[in-house]
Amino acid sequence: MSEYVAPLRDMQFVLRELAQVETLSSLPGFEDATPDLAEAILEEAAKFATNVLSPLNISGDREGVRWDDGEVYTAKGWKEAYRQFIDGGWNGLSGDPTYGGQGLPRLISALVEEMWNGANTSFALCPMLTAGFIESVALCGTDLQKQTWLPKLVSGEWTGTMVLTESQAGSDLSAVRTRAVPQADGSYRLHGQKIYITYGEHDMTDNIVHLVLARTPDAPEGVKGISLFIVPKFLLNADGSPGPRNDVRCMSTEHKLGIHASPTCVLAFGDNAGATGWLVGEENRGLEYMFITMNAARYSVGIEGIGLSERAYQRALRYARDRIQGTEAGSGKRERVSILRHPDVRRMLMEMKAYTEAMRALACVVGAAIDVSHAHADAGVRAAKQKFVDLMIPVVKGWSTETAIHVASIGVQVHGGMGFIEETGAAQHLRDARITAIYEGTTCIQALDLIGRKVARDGGTTIREMIMAIHDVEVRIRNRNDEQLTAIANELSRSTASLEIAVDFIVANYGSDIRKTAAGAVPFLELVGIVAGGWQMARAADVALTHLASGDGDKTFYQGKLLTARFYADHILPRSEALAHCVVHGADAALAMHDDAF
């Protein structure tokens, strides 16, 4: 069984040529983040992903986790791998140096995160949730809370969770019922039950710290009455070490389609006197604070989709090279060949490759924008980048995860009947990918956020600025008078025109007919993703041609990059017109259908 191999060459290309990592080293706090340092980190991360995490992926999937009287035990090798993970400093890569982090740009940690997910998605979920906890408390917690919890979480010695969902409160968090009763000492006692808590209980660390949504006794109904609390598994002794067990218990773990080695827990708070917790920020602003964690997690889940896509592609490509079946069409020879020589297998592999490279490029450009939005000295630049980031977070999350499911499904198809057999490993990627479009907000939720808060609210200003940037790339590559680039420019132009039509429709109709625009929200999100991915592939093609013309670098890599961009233009960008049609004309039948006729 082959192991994951990090796509270092493409990551280096994206890092330097598209995300332009060298510009980040001029930002305050990122002075040491040179391209050479970034590539050295990627090389070391690749070794850890291949040698430590990847070998545990299939075994962890088969073994799963074990629940025993409230305790959860991870699969064989998990604890040892996690210890190596934190000893290597990987958990604090982009963490605040104030609390022991390395303070590196999000762009760099995003590519490292992709490796963790490509090698072992179930493992990668644990540090992902911890990072979200850290971000919320760092921005909204008190100084004492930060000093108490963040150093151990940044190092990875303790892990963090997001505790939102209840059986009656899934995507609708206004229905949360967990209670938080204030105590004389300033703490709260929590009572309630939560479900779907990733790494809510495990045996890899000596403490787990939960961020819990709950209601205080006098809180108003709905989302305006939700507060956020820090609730540890173990309360702390005076010296900061874990002390007595808090009133939090894991009632069970879920039996899932995929991510079997990641414990998804049902947690009971307050079976006895109540789980001790501390309010984060102000009362009744918990959902606002939690969305800080949520946005960080949404970007990370998009990265998760990219890692899964890369792994599914690698496995399918390896199988296609090794599987000998049939003769080559049009060759006139009777010699049996690998299925890589069959045109439709090549088409499928190219689609997997093109989508994965487009998603990686887009996510990294957004990652660099996150860094600029946080660190640039000019407030105007920070604000402009933040608007772009806000626009693209639902796209990175929604498009990348839906596409990961599609790519993993193609991977099964490349394997043929063997793809349906668990032993090949192809099916696991599809099973693992399926949840990514659901958690941290379903694709519909991402799409509604996109059309409402990110497009209609500013009259389409931010997305039209992105469209202008895409037009600039189209003009530039067209002016190079190269056959391949001209073909890419033509398709990019048509797809961008389709996006403009859809944007105009959303802006014109969102305020007056929200149901009509909502019916086309998911097609709109896919449309934005496809066009934004095409934008980055066109940029990549431009760079590749420059290298080919000058004769420097890896000729095979740059030719592959150029042809992959051309494939994206020919096979994926044309879908834009159909998606725009769905946005503009697709609501009538769905909304007119009588409930009883379904």
Image: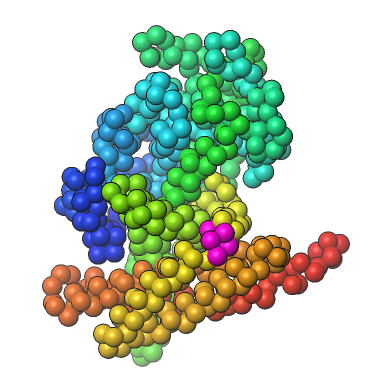
Q: Residue sitting at 35 percent across and 62 percent down?
A: 361
Q: Is residue 507 visible?
A: yes
Query: Closer to the camera, 312 or 285?
Result: 285
Q: Is residue 21 left or right of residue 180?
A: left
Query: Closer to the camera, 153 or 223?
Result: 223
Q: Residue sitting at 27 percent across and 33 percent down?
A: 97
Residue range of the region highlighted in magenta in the rendering:
454-459
Work out whether 261 lies above or below 99: below
Q: Indicate the position of residue 224 as horizontal and vertical percent values.
A: 65, 37
Q: Indicate the position of residue 489 as horizontal and vertical percent values.
A: 37, 82
Q: Residue sitting at 53 percent across and 24 percent down?
A: 279
Q: Residue sitting at 66 percent across and 68 percent down?
A: 509
Q: Is residue 482 left or right of residue 260?
A: left
Q: Indicate the position of residue 41 as horizontal and vertical percent values.
A: 22, 46
Q: Quadrant of the C terminus?
A: bottom right
Is 451 magenta? The answer is no
Q: How is the image coloured?
A: rainbow
Q: Quadrant of residue 343 in the image?
A: bottom left
Extreme-right residue of the structure: 596
Work out whether 333 lies above or below 547: below
Q: Is residue 393 left or right of residue 257?
A: left
User: How many numbered marks does the figure carry?
Assistant: 0
Q: Quadrant of residue 268 in the image?
A: top right
Query: Closer to the camera, 287 or 321?
Result: 287
Q: Is residue 564 visible?
A: no
Q: Indicate the position of residue 289 as horizontal and vertical percent values.
A: 52, 37
Work out whether 402 lies above or below 471: above
